[in-house]
């Protein structure tokens, strides 16, 4: 008689990025009912933490497709971005033509679309606090960090999944770098961060001398760039109003 397939009873994933954007890595693992563990991981030379979180979850879902699963199986992750995007935001994004509530383009759309297609009935994402002593989360983090540093960690019955396999539709390097800068701009605007002139020049990729001549609000892509005084600037989502256009 053929041996009965062993169910997957636990799954976890994590992502890491050095610099954000910068070199990144991801890690994931599957635990089976017989006590065995299968670990996976990979790296990308120029990415963001969020993209690595999504890539790790995608790798798990693709692996789970062909495996028997415990009906109570969940995927454990410390990424609220992954959980909220996958469980709540994505339906609204699709209805709006992959636009956010503020009208901006959804970042990491390529990975979100692949994740949406890879959904498995009954397999939910569950949040676990990062670096809290959860052994599976800590292990996935260790794998992800190692790959982000250019290291090749030893993995239990594991495999290294190349970027090409998981991110088949990754934009070319120049466009990928633009995506990471847009993601940073969105984060800066949402949190109301003040940027020094040097930091702003790096974000918008304009000469520092050119920015030093500015004193009034101006527009960069989908954001208004507003002076705060003291040589600092703030990004604000543009509603089609004031400011010179770039």
Image: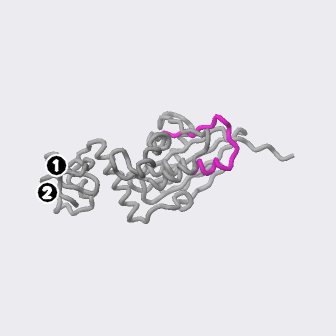
| Rendered view: 83 above or below 157 | above
Question: Residue 242, image x and y in percent?
Answer: 18, 51
The answer to the question of whether label 1 and label 2 lie on touching residues, with beta carbons closer than 8 A, is yes
Q: Give the range drawn in magenta.
A: 59-78
Question: Residue 58, image x and y in percent?
Answer: 55, 50
Residue 42 vs residue 215: left or right?
A: right
Depth order, front residue of 25/154 = 25
Q: Is mark 2 on a helix, strand or loop?
A: loop
Depth order, front residue of 183/157 = 183
Question: What is the image's colouring?
Answer: one colour
- Residue appearing at x 39%, y 63% in the figure: 175
Residue with the most extreme front position: 95
Residue annotated with mark 2 = 214
- Residue appearing at x 21%, y 63% in the figure: 207
Label disc, if present, on residue 126 of the rendered structure: none
Q: What element carries label 1?
A: strand
Residue 230 falls inside the magenta stretch: no
Depth order, front residue of 155/239 = 239
Question: Residue 164, image x and y in percent?
Answer: 54, 62
Residue 61 falls inside the magenta stretch: yes
Label disc, if present, on residue 227 of the rendered structure: 1
- Residue appearing at x 50%, y 36% in the figure: 127
Q: How far apart are marks 1 and 2 (CA)?
A: 9 Å
| Rendered view: 139 above or below 217 | above
Label located before the other in sequence (1 or 2): 2
How crowded is the residue under tag 1: few (<14 C-alpha within 10 Å), some, or many (20+)? some
- Image quadrant for the C terminus? bottom left
- Residue appearing at x 64%, y 47% in the figure: 64
| Rendered view: 204 above or below 230 | below
Residue 23 vs residue 244: left or right?
A: right
Question: Residue 49, image x and y in percent?
Answer: 43, 49
């Amino acid at each position: 008689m053929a041996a009965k397939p062993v169910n997957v009873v636990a799954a976890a994933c994590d992502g890491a990025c050095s610099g954000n954007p910068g070199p990144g890595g991801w890690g994931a693992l599957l635990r089976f009912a017989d006590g065995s563990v299968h670990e996976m991981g990979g790296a990308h030379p120029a990415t963001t933490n969020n993209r690595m979180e999504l890539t790790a979850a995608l790798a798990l879902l693709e692996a789970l497709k062909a495996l028997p699963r415990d009906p109570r199986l969940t995927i454990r992750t410390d990424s609220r971005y992954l959980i909220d995007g996958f469980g709540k935001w994505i339906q609204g994004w699709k209805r709006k033509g992959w636009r956010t509530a503020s009208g901006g383009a959804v970042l990491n759309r390529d990975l979100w679309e692949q994740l949406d297609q890879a959904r498995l009935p009954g397999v939910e994402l569950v949040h676990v606090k990062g670096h809290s002593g959860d052994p599976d989360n800590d292990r996935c983090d260790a794998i992800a960090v190692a790959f982000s540093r250019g290291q090749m960690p030893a993995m239990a019955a594991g495999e290294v999944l190349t970027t090409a396999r998981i991110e088949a539709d990754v934009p070319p390097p120049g466009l990928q770098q633009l995506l990471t800068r847009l993601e940073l701009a969105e984060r800066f605007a949402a949190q109301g961060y003040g940027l020094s002139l040097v930091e702003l020049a790096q974000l918008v990729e304009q000469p520092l001398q050119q920015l030093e001549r500015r004193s009034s609000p101006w527009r960069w892509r989908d954001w208004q760039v507003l002076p705060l005084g003291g040589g600092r600037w703030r990004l604000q989502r543009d509603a089609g109003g004031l400011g010179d256009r770039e």
